[in-house]
Every structure is written in structure tokens, then in C-alpha cells.
Image: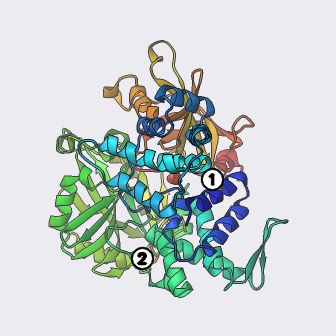
């Protein structure tokens, strides 16, 4: 297939803001390109599925160099143009157009060529890697038309701007492979679906594809199954050690009574630690560890890998756990922000492990020796987990209280808070494990107003002694379409000295490579960094695109374990707003 065919799809997606129209555009494209399921990664703006740990590893400076090589323009001029336009894709289109007009030559690109070249970027390592990556990207750009160059560059940098979130991709796959079976069509004039039979069948198909995606994190795999086996192929999906699944999520309950009403009684109660989720996979002698955003961090936790190998006596398993940091001096638990650097550390890992040790608290078992357990009850899964894990210092199955007595739960809750934890997890003992879902099988109980996980989308350079730091940050949440909408600015909570906590200097270094536009002191960044913020109140506001503003937001922690897709959504903001002062 010509790459230009795919590029025309990108352009069509970018031209419309209608979610349903995007769905049909992608669905019809897939219908007309049978046998090319791998193309789904590129449609999403990716080269590999989410569970794959390989990364292209292309920083902005490397991309600028590749553009310079392919177009003959200086890096300085390209960078200046990028800052002005705010979109490196548009810069690539503009420069390629000039080059094409002067050379009157452009060799056609195929999707296969683009896919293979971009895959090579992740395989390169060692001396001369940067030069070889520049050569690979420049080779593609030299053969690209202006429009192809625009989206090639956007794919490399991970900023497609097509508005194609997981929900649209899921629905597009339903459209591509099941629309005839469930008799659904699209009325473009009304921008509405037309159902030939019961629309419940469509909703059921969407649920089936979403469940399959939560188990595989791979839309191409799902498309392949649907193309070869039809709808029944989805039921054959099993968990596979080494391929992470989305973790089950838990909404917040305001009171113990509300928690019991949601999950049922008796309920299973566990301490809620201020740590980070680690999904543990084991197959024979191989152990993997993944964060909740599906990022493999096995190399960052060698001591935990050793503990799992020694104390989990089964051939294969997938376990959900919480890693909690503790003080070497006092033995007391530390807040997440004190140990978050362990997730991103690539060097001096053993030294950092001694300085910032963590304890592994396991609480659920989703797969055991070839069998997927997620549809079994939580009570049964826990019994099996207790048989699997040999409790030792630094690795254990979390303690649990099962009761219907609210007073006992309250006492357990107070014990947890006294120990320095965030609160309690309260779970339905009959509940299944639902990846990626907040379905009422469990809730969290915390004494403070719920914090928000927000995405940094921009900022402002400081003044005086903060002149070299970005010291005010524009923050956003996700709306129903998965687009980011702003909800305020945060400028407090970070430290001036790194030894006091996460600092302005550290945040600035994190954001610098992501800057795509500068206007005076204002910067726009590629959305990638997620932070946890507290606030005094949520207010209605016409100033921000979300329609809301956080009053006195304060930085709490860098959430290196979370991606943009894990950030808080507008529904949660509205729910929290309505709960204030008895609005609901």
C-alpha cells in the first residue's frame, strides 16, 4: 500500500472534530485494506503496540538534524520556524514543499517501507546510533511528498493531532469488521448511526472489543482475530505473561456506608498504600514488571525481580501489586513522590535501590500456570495468591479484613492512616477482575479531597532567580473525546532545591525536550508529563477550555507511572464539583 493512502486518512481525520465521523473514516479505511492489520499501529500514530517495550528514541534535536539533512535547511532556521508554527509536522511539510519544487522529484513511499524503517530506530544501539537514526529518518523524508513528510515527522515525535483516541479506534474496529453482521450504517448528513436491528447488539460488540483490548492492549491483534475468525475469535483471547493488561481501577467512596453500598457486604478491606502499581509477570525463569501505564520497568527493580524468582513458586503467573517505598533509617513508609525517581532511573540502579528500597505488596492474581483467572471471584483469586507467594521481608500478600461491621472497618481505616497510608481499599469478595474498568467491584476510601492527575500542556519561564526555570505550568484533563482541556495553572508545591523534593529545575529539564512553541515567556509542550495536584476547590470558569478551574492548585508529585491516557477526565472533575457543598 502507498503511504500516501494512509496520509490522506490522517488528513481527513484532522479536518473533522466529529468523533463518529472519525470512527467511520477509520472503519471504512480498514474495510478497504484487508489483510493489513499491522497498519493499525501507524493509524494510531505508533510503531509498536502499547505492551511492547521498544521505543524509537528520537529526541527533538535528532529530528531537527534529520530534517536538516533531508531538506538542506539549517537546524537553527528549522528550530526558529518550529517555535513560530508550533507544529514540527507543518515545518516538515513547508520545507519539503520548497525542496520538491526545486528538485521536481519525489520517490514514492510504501507503508511497509515506513513501518520497517521506523522499527529500525528502536533496534539501534551503541556507538554511532544517533547518526544512523538521522540517516534512517532522512532517507524517509527525502522520498516523502510534503504531506507525507508532515505526518512522518509527527509519527516519529508522537504527536499526530488527528484526535484518534482509544475509544474511536475501538469503535472503528467494530465498524470495520462487524458492521455488516450487526447491521449498522452511517448517516453522514445527520452524523448519526442507523441501526437495522436492535442497537443493543452494537453496544455488545463495542463491549466485546473493549474487553479484548483491555486483555491485549493491541488493536492489531484484535483486528486479526476478527478478520480470520469473526466475532467468536474474541472469546479465545487469554492472558499471556510478558504482555501487560490494563489494571483494574477503583473509584472513590466518601464514607464506609457508601463503600459497602457499592461493593456489597461482607467486604474485603486492605490498606491503601501511597505507592505505585506494579504488574508482575512470571514465565519459567523470566520475570517482567510493568507500571499501570504498561511501561516495563524490570531493569529498574533488580532486587524485586530476585525476590519474585525466589518466593513465587509457580511456572507462570500475572500478579497485581503495590510497590511502597520506605525509609532505610526508620523503616516507615515514604510518600510516592519520595521514590518516584526509581521508575525512570536508567543508571546507578543498584545504588538507588539501596538508598530508596521498596516493599512489594501483592493483592490480586489474574493468571496462574496457563489459566486466566479474571472471571473468578476475588475471594477465590486471593486464596490462590496466598498459596503462590512465600511471604518474606519486602515481598508479601497484603493483609486483609473481611467483615460487614462498619465499626471494625472504621478501626481498620484508622490503623491504616496511623501507619502513614492513604486509607483503605474496600472490595467485593465476589467481584471479577475488570481490566481498565471502574465497575463497583472495589472502591478506595481516603480522608482528603480527591486529588487529580493532570497533564502539563504548557508553562511560563520565571523571573529573577527562577528565570532559568519554567515555574508556572498550564495543566489539563481529558474530555469525553480524549482531548485535553485546560483546567488551570499550578506554580506551588515544587521545590527550589532538589534535596527538598521534586524541584523546578528537575521539572524544567523534563519539559525542555517537549517544548514545541515559545511566545515570549510562554511555552507550549508536547503533552506527556502527568502530575498529581491538590486544590482547595473546583470552580466554574469561562477562562479555561474545560469550563472549570482549580482554586489554589498545588503540585504533589510527578506521576512517572502514568501516561496521558491515565490522567483524570472531565467526568471526574464534574463529579467532584457537584459533591462540593452538597450540590449532589
The reply to whether residue 204 is visible in this rendering is yes
Is disc 1 placed on a helix, strand or loop?
Answer: loop
Q: CA distance from mark 1 to mark 2?
A: 34 Å
Work out whether residue 123 or residue 212 is closer to the camera in this orientation and state it.
123
The reply to whether residue 265 is visible in this rendering is no
Q: Which residue is mark 2?
A: 374
Classify mark 2: residues with Cα within 10 Å, few (<14), some (14-19) or many (20+): some
Q: Position of residue 494 (x, y in %)?
A: 44, 29
Q: Position of residue 309 (x, y in %)?
A: 17, 65
Q: Relative to 523, is 532 above or below?
A: below
Q: Quadrant of residue 513?
A: top left
**Quadrant in which the N terminus appears:** bottom right
Is disc 2 placed on a helix, strand or loop?
Answer: loop
Work out whether residue 257 or residue 218 is closer to the camera in this orientation and state it.
218
Q: Residue at x 59, y 32 (%)?
A: 489
- State how many labels appear: 2
Q: Residue furthest left?
A: 310
- Which tag, 1 or 2, sits closer to the chain's start? 1
Residue 326 placement, left or right of 157: left
Q: Position of residue 361 (x, y in %)?
A: 29, 59
Q: Which residue is mark 1?
A: 162
Work out whether residue 406 or residue 435 is closer to the camera in this orientation and state it.
435
Q: Position of residue 341 (x, y in %)?
A: 32, 41
Residue 375 placement, left or right of 490: left
Classify mark 1: residues with Cα within 10 Å, few (<14), some (14-19) or many (20+): many
Q: Residue furthest top?
A: 464
Q: Residue at x 55, y 39 (%)?
A: 88
Amino acid at each position: 500500500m502507498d503511504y500516501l493512502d494512509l496520509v490522506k486518512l490522517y488528513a481527513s481525520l484532522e479536518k473533522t472534530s466529529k468523533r463518529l465521523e472519525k470512527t467511520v473514516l477509520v472503519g471504512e479505511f480498514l474495510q478497504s485494506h484487508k489483510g493489513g492489520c499491522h497498519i493499525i499501529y501507524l493509524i494510531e500514530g505508533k510503531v509498536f503496540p502499547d505492551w511492547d517495550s521498544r521505543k524509537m528514541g528520537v529526541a527533538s534535536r535528532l529530528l531537527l538534524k534529520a530534517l536538516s539533512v533531508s531538506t538542506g535547511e539549517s537546524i537553527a532556521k528549522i528550530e526558529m520556524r518550529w517555535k513560530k508554527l508550533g507544529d514540527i509536522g507543518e515545518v516538515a511539510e513547508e520545507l519539503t514543499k520548497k525542496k520538491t519544487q526545486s528538485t521536481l522529484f519525489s520517490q514514492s513511499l510504501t507503508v511497509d517501507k515506513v513501518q520497517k524503517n521506523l522499527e529500525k530506530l528502536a533496534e539501534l544501539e551503541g556507538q554511532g546510533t544517533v547518526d544512523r537514526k538521522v540517516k534512517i529518518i532522512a532517507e524517509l523524508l527525502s522520498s516523502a511528498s510534503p504531506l507525507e513528510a508532515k505526518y512522518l515527522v509527527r509519527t516519529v515525535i508522537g504527536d499526530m493531532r488527528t484526535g484518534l483516541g482509544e475509544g474511536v479506534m475501538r469503535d472503528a474496529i467494530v465498524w470495520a469488521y462487524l458492521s455488516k453482521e450487526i447491521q449498522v450504517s452511517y448517516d453522514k448528513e445527520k452524523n448519526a448511526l442507523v441501526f437495522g436491528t436492535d442497537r443493543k447488539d452494537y453496544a455488545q460488540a463495542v463491549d466485546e472489543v473493549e474487553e479484548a483490548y483491555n486483555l491485549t492492549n493491541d488493536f492489531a491483534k484484535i483486528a486479526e482475530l476478527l478478520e480470520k475468525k469473526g466475532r467468536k475469535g474474541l472469546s479465545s483471547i487469554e492472558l499471556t505473561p510478558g504482555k501487560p493488561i490494563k489494571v483494574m481501577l477503583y473509584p472513590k467512596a466518601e464514607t464506609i456506608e457508601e463503600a459497602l453500598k457499592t461493593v456489597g457486604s461482607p467486604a474485603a478491606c486492605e490498606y491503601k498504600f501511597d505507592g505505585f502499581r506494579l504488574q508482575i509477570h512470571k514465565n519459567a525463569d523470566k520475570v517482567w514488571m510493568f507500571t499501570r501505564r504498561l511501561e516495563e520497568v524490570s531493569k529498574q527493580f533488580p532486587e524485586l525481580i530476585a525476590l519474585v524468582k525466589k518466593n513465587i513458586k509457580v511456572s507462570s503467573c500475572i500478579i497485581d501489586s503495590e510497590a511502597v517505598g520506605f525509609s532505610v533509617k526508620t523503616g516507615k513508609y515514604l510518600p510516592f513522590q519520595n521514590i518516584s525517581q526509581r521508575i525512570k532511573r536508567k543508571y546507578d540502579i543498584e545504588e538507588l535501590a539501596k538508598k530508596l528500597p521498596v516493599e512489594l505488596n501483592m493483592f490480586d492474581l489474574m493468571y496462574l500456570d496457563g489459566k486466566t483467572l479474571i472471571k473468578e471471584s476475588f475471594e477465590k483469586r486471593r486464596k490462590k495468591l496466598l498459596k503462590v507467594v512465600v511471604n518474606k521481608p519486602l515481598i508479601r500478600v497484603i493483609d486483609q479484613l473481611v467483615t460487614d461491621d462498619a465499626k471494625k472497618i472504621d478501626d481498620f481505616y484508622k490503623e491504616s492512616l496511623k501507619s502513614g497510608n492513604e486509607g483503605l481499599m474496600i472490595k467485593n469478595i465476589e467481584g471479577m477482575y475488570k481490566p481498565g474498568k471502574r465497575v463497583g467491584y472495589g472502591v478506595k476510601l481516603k480522608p482528603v479531597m480527591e486529588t487529580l492527575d493532570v497533564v502539563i500542556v504548557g508553562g511560563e519561564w520565571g523571573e529573577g532567580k527562577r528565570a532559568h526555570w519554567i515555574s508556572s505550568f498550564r495543566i489539563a484533563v481529558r474530555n469525553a473525546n480524549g482531548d485535553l482541556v485546560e483546567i488551570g495553572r499550578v506554580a506551588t508545591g515544587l521545590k527550589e532545591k532538589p534535596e527538598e523534593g521534586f524541584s523546578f529545575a528537575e521539572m524544567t529539564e523534563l519539559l525542555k525536550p517537549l517544548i514545541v512553541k515559545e511566545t515570549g515567556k510562554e511555552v507550549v509542550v508536547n503533552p506527556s508529563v502527568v502530575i498529581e495536584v491538590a486544590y482547595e476547590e473546583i470552580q466554574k470558569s469561562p477562562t479555561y477550555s474545560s469550563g472549570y478551574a482549580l482554586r489554589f492548585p498545588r503540585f504533589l508529585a510527578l506521576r512517572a507511572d502514568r501516561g496521558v491516557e491515565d490522567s483524570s477526565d472531565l467526568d471526574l472533575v464534574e463529579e467532584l464539583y457537584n459533591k462540593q457543598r452538597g450540590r449532589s
